[in-house]
Protein backbone atom coordinates (compact mmCIF):
# COMPACT_ATOMS: atom_id res chain seq x y z
CA UNK A 1 0.00 0.00 0.00
CA UNK A 2 2.96 2.36 0.63
CA UNK A 3 4.17 1.75 -2.92
CA UNK A 4 0.73 2.64 -4.29
CA UNK A 5 0.64 5.90 -2.35
CA UNK A 6 4.22 7.02 -2.89
CA UNK A 7 5.00 5.76 -6.40
CA UNK A 8 1.95 4.60 -8.34
CA UNK A 9 -0.25 7.53 -7.33
CA UNK A 10 2.33 10.06 -8.48
CA UNK A 11 3.04 8.22 -11.73
CA UNK A 12 -0.61 8.10 -12.79
CA UNK A 13 -1.73 11.30 -11.05
CA UNK A 14 -4.09 9.42 -8.72
CA UNK A 15 -5.75 10.99 -5.70
CA UNK A 16 -4.70 9.60 -2.32
CA UNK A 17 -7.75 11.07 -0.63
CA UNK A 18 -11.00 9.24 -0.01
CA UNK A 19 -13.40 10.14 -2.82
CA UNK A 20 -16.61 9.41 -0.92
CA UNK A 21 -18.06 10.26 2.46
CA UNK A 22 -18.74 7.39 4.85
CA UNK A 23 -22.20 7.56 6.40
CA UNK A 24 -22.92 5.68 9.60
CA UNK A 25 -26.03 3.49 9.59
CA UNK A 26 -28.39 4.42 12.41
CA UNK A 27 -30.62 2.09 14.42
CA UNK A 28 -33.55 3.19 12.26
CA UNK A 29 -31.55 2.40 9.11
CA UNK A 30 -30.80 -1.13 10.34
CA UNK A 31 -34.44 -1.76 11.26
CA UNK A 32 -35.50 -0.47 7.84
CA UNK A 33 -33.03 -2.79 6.10
CA UNK A 34 -34.19 -5.84 8.08
CA UNK A 35 -37.90 -5.22 7.67
CA UNK A 36 -37.60 -4.41 3.95
CA UNK A 37 -35.59 -7.59 3.39
CA UNK A 38 -38.67 -9.67 4.23
CA UNK A 39 -41.61 -7.38 3.46
CA UNK A 40 -40.31 -6.67 -0.06
CA UNK A 41 -38.73 -10.09 -0.64
CA UNK A 42 -40.19 -10.31 -4.15
CA UNK A 43 -38.13 -7.24 -5.09
CA UNK A 44 -34.98 -8.60 -3.42
CA UNK A 45 -34.55 -12.04 -5.01
CA UNK A 46 -31.94 -14.27 -3.42
CA UNK A 47 -31.37 -17.77 -2.10
CA UNK A 48 -33.37 -18.33 1.14
CA UNK A 49 -30.21 -19.26 3.02
CA UNK A 50 -28.55 -16.06 1.86
CA UNK A 51 -31.54 -14.07 3.12
CA UNK A 52 -31.27 -15.58 6.61
CA UNK A 53 -27.47 -15.21 6.57
CA UNK A 54 -27.67 -11.57 5.48
CA UNK A 55 -30.20 -10.75 8.21
CA UNK A 56 -28.07 -12.42 10.87
CA UNK A 57 -24.82 -10.82 9.73
CA UNK A 58 -26.44 -7.36 9.70
CA UNK A 59 -27.35 -7.94 13.35
CA UNK A 60 -23.80 -9.03 14.22
CA UNK A 61 -22.31 -6.12 12.28
CA UNK A 62 -24.61 -3.72 14.12
CA UNK A 63 -22.85 -4.67 17.35
CA UNK A 64 -19.70 -3.11 15.94
CA UNK A 65 -17.67 -5.92 14.33
CA UNK A 66 -15.88 -5.45 11.01
CA UNK A 67 -17.32 -7.49 8.11
CA UNK A 68 -14.11 -9.47 7.67
CA UNK A 69 -14.37 -10.86 11.19
CA UNK A 70 -17.66 -12.67 10.71
CA UNK A 71 -17.58 -13.63 7.03
CA UNK A 72 -18.00 -17.42 6.68
CA UNK A 73 -18.42 -17.93 10.43
CA UNK A 74 -18.09 -21.61 11.36
CA UNK A 75 -20.37 -23.67 13.56
CA UNK A 76 -17.55 -24.13 16.08
CA UNK A 77 -17.68 -20.38 16.69
CA UNK A 78 -21.31 -20.61 17.80
CA UNK A 79 -22.87 -22.30 20.81
CA UNK A 80 -26.55 -22.59 21.67
CA UNK A 81 -27.48 -23.21 25.28
CA UNK A 82 -30.71 -23.75 27.17
CA UNK A 83 -30.57 -21.96 30.53
CA UNK A 84 -32.98 -21.61 33.39
CA UNK A 85 -34.26 -18.05 33.80
CA UNK A 86 -33.36 -17.13 37.41
CA UNK A 87 -36.56 -15.11 37.79
CA UNK A 88 -39.23 -17.16 36.03
CA UNK A 89 -37.45 -20.56 36.20
CA UNK A 90 -38.52 -21.05 32.58
CA UNK A 91 -36.02 -22.35 29.97
CA UNK A 92 -34.48 -19.76 27.65
CA UNK A 93 -32.11 -19.96 24.70
CA UNK A 94 -28.71 -18.28 24.81
CA UNK A 95 -26.27 -17.95 21.91
CA UNK A 96 -22.54 -17.62 22.55
CA UNK A 97 -20.66 -16.32 19.51
CA UNK A 98 -16.89 -16.08 19.12
CA UNK A 99 -15.47 -13.50 16.71
CA UNK A 100 -11.85 -13.60 15.52
CA UNK A 101 -10.62 -10.04 15.15
CA UNK A 102 -8.83 -9.22 11.88
CA UNK A 103 -6.19 -6.75 10.71
CA UNK A 104 -3.53 -8.09 13.07
CA UNK A 105 0.05 -6.89 12.85
CA UNK A 106 2.42 -9.52 11.45
CA UNK A 107 4.75 -9.08 14.45
CA UNK A 108 2.01 -9.02 17.05
CA UNK A 109 1.97 -11.79 19.66
CA UNK A 110 -1.47 -13.35 19.93
CA UNK A 111 -2.41 -13.58 23.60
CA UNK A 112 -6.08 -14.31 23.03
CA UNK A 113 -7.12 -10.66 23.20
CA UNK A 114 -8.00 -10.75 19.51
CA UNK A 115 -10.80 -13.25 20.10
CA UNK A 116 -14.08 -11.84 21.39
CA UNK A 117 -16.91 -14.01 22.74
CA UNK A 118 -20.28 -12.49 23.53
CA UNK A 119 -23.63 -13.88 24.61
CA UNK A 120 -27.08 -12.98 23.34
CA UNK A 121 -30.45 -13.96 24.74
CA UNK A 122 -33.90 -14.05 23.20
CA UNK A 123 -35.71 -10.72 22.91
CA UNK A 124 -39.42 -10.06 22.25
CA UNK A 125 -38.79 -8.24 18.95
CA UNK A 126 -38.07 -11.14 16.60
CA UNK A 127 -36.56 -9.04 13.82
CA UNK A 128 -33.59 -8.18 16.08
CA UNK A 129 -33.43 -11.51 17.93
CA UNK A 130 -30.04 -12.93 16.99
CA UNK A 131 -30.71 -16.15 18.92
CA UNK A 132 -33.81 -16.90 16.85
CA UNK A 133 -31.92 -16.67 13.56
CA UNK A 134 -29.04 -18.81 14.83
CA UNK A 135 -31.51 -21.48 15.96
CA UNK A 136 -33.50 -21.33 12.71
CA UNK A 137 -30.39 -21.86 10.59
CA UNK A 138 -29.18 -24.73 12.78
CA UNK A 139 -32.59 -26.41 12.52
CA UNK A 140 -32.57 -25.98 8.74
CA UNK A 141 -29.09 -27.54 8.55
CA UNK A 142 -30.09 -30.41 10.87
CA UNK A 143 -26.99 -29.43 12.82
CA UNK A 144 -27.91 -30.62 16.32
CA UNK A 145 -26.52 -33.80 17.85
CA UNK A 146 -30.01 -34.48 19.19
CA UNK A 147 -32.75 -34.29 16.58
CA UNK A 148 -35.18 -31.38 16.94
CA UNK A 149 -38.09 -30.72 14.62
CA UNK A 150 -39.07 -27.18 15.66
CA UNK A 151 -37.95 -24.07 17.50
CA UNK A 152 -40.38 -24.78 20.35
CA UNK A 153 -38.90 -28.23 20.78
CA UNK A 154 -35.50 -26.66 21.50
CA UNK A 155 -37.01 -25.20 24.67
CA UNK A 156 -39.34 -28.04 25.62
CA UNK A 157 -37.31 -31.21 25.15
CA UNK A 158 -34.03 -30.59 27.01
CA UNK A 159 -34.63 -31.54 30.65
CA UNK A 160 -32.66 -29.21 32.90
CA UNK A 161 -33.49 -31.24 36.03
CA UNK A 162 -31.01 -30.11 38.70
CA UNK A 163 -28.75 -28.04 36.39
CA UNK A 164 -29.25 -24.50 35.16
CA UNK A 165 -27.57 -24.79 31.75
CA UNK A 166 -27.32 -27.37 28.95
CA UNK A 167 -25.41 -26.91 25.70
CA UNK A 168 -27.21 -28.06 22.56
CA UNK A 169 -24.24 -29.70 20.88
CA UNK A 170 -23.63 -29.88 17.14
CA UNK A 171 -23.46 -33.26 15.47
CA UNK A 172 -20.16 -34.68 14.24
CA UNK A 173 -18.94 -33.04 11.06
CA UNK A 174 -20.68 -29.69 11.63
CA UNK A 175 -17.92 -27.89 13.53
CA UNK A 176 -15.95 -26.77 10.46
CA UNK A 177 -18.96 -25.94 8.30
CA UNK A 178 -20.03 -22.29 7.82
CA UNK A 179 -23.29 -21.46 9.58
CA UNK A 180 -23.92 -18.26 7.60
CA UNK A 181 -22.11 -18.75 4.26
CA UNK A 182 -22.28 -15.38 2.57
CA UNK A 183 -19.36 -13.80 0.70
CA UNK A 184 -18.73 -10.13 1.34
CA UNK A 185 -19.50 -9.14 -2.27
CA UNK A 186 -22.90 -10.86 -1.95
CA UNK A 187 -23.50 -9.14 1.39
CA UNK A 188 -22.84 -5.76 -0.25
CA UNK A 189 -25.06 -6.65 -3.18
CA UNK A 190 -27.97 -7.48 -0.86
CA UNK A 191 -27.30 -4.44 1.32
CA UNK A 192 -27.37 -2.05 -1.64
CA UNK A 193 -30.38 -3.71 -3.23
CA UNK A 194 -32.39 -3.69 0.01
CA UNK A 195 -31.45 -0.07 0.68
CA UNK A 196 -32.61 0.87 -2.82
CA UNK A 197 -35.89 -1.06 -2.51
CA UNK A 198 -36.49 0.72 0.80
CA UNK A 199 -36.58 3.98 -1.17
CA UNK A 200 -33.06 5.34 -0.72
CA UNK A 201 -30.79 6.33 -3.58
CA UNK A 202 -27.67 7.21 -1.61
CA UNK A 203 -25.67 4.14 -0.59
CA UNK A 204 -24.64 3.71 3.03
CA UNK A 205 -20.91 2.92 3.33
Image (cartoon, rainbow, N blue to C red):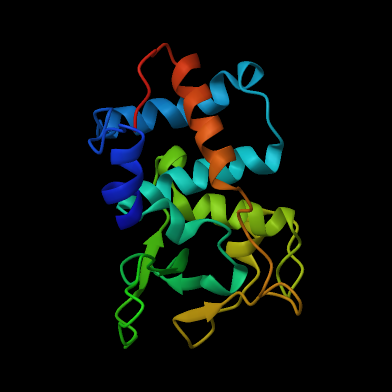
Quadrant in the rendering for residue 72: bottom right
> Does residue 1 appear anywhere in the picture?
no
Q: In which quadrant will I find the C terminus?
A: top left
Vertical position of residue 164 compared to residue 57: above or below: below
Q: Nearer the viewer, residue 40 or 191?
A: 191
Q: In this view, does 114 lie to the left or right of 76?
A: left
Could you tell me residue 145's position as x and y percent? Answer: 73, 76
Could you tell me residue 82's position as x and y percent? Answer: 51, 71
Q: In which quadrant will I find the N terminus?
A: bottom left
Question: Image point 53% across, 46% down: which residue?
Answer: 184
Question: Image point 40% across, 44% down: which residue?
Answer: 124
Q: In this view, does 115 lie to the left or right of 10?
A: right
Quadrant in the rendering for residue 25: top left
Question: Image point 70% across, 57% down: which residue?
Answer: 139
Could you tell me residue 118's position as x and y percent? Answer: 36, 68
Vertical position of residue 173 compared to residue 73: above or below: below
Could you tell me residue 182's position as x and y percent? Answer: 61, 48
Q: In this view, does 96 lie to the left or right of 184?
A: left
Q: Nearer the viewer, residue 192 or 54?
A: 192
Amino acid sequence: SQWIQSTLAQKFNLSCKQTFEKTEATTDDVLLILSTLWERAVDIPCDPRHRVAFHTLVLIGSIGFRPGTYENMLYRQVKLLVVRDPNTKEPRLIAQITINQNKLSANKIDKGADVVTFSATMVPCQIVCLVTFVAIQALQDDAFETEFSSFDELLQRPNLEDVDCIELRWKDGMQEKPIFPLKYYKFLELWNRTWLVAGNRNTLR
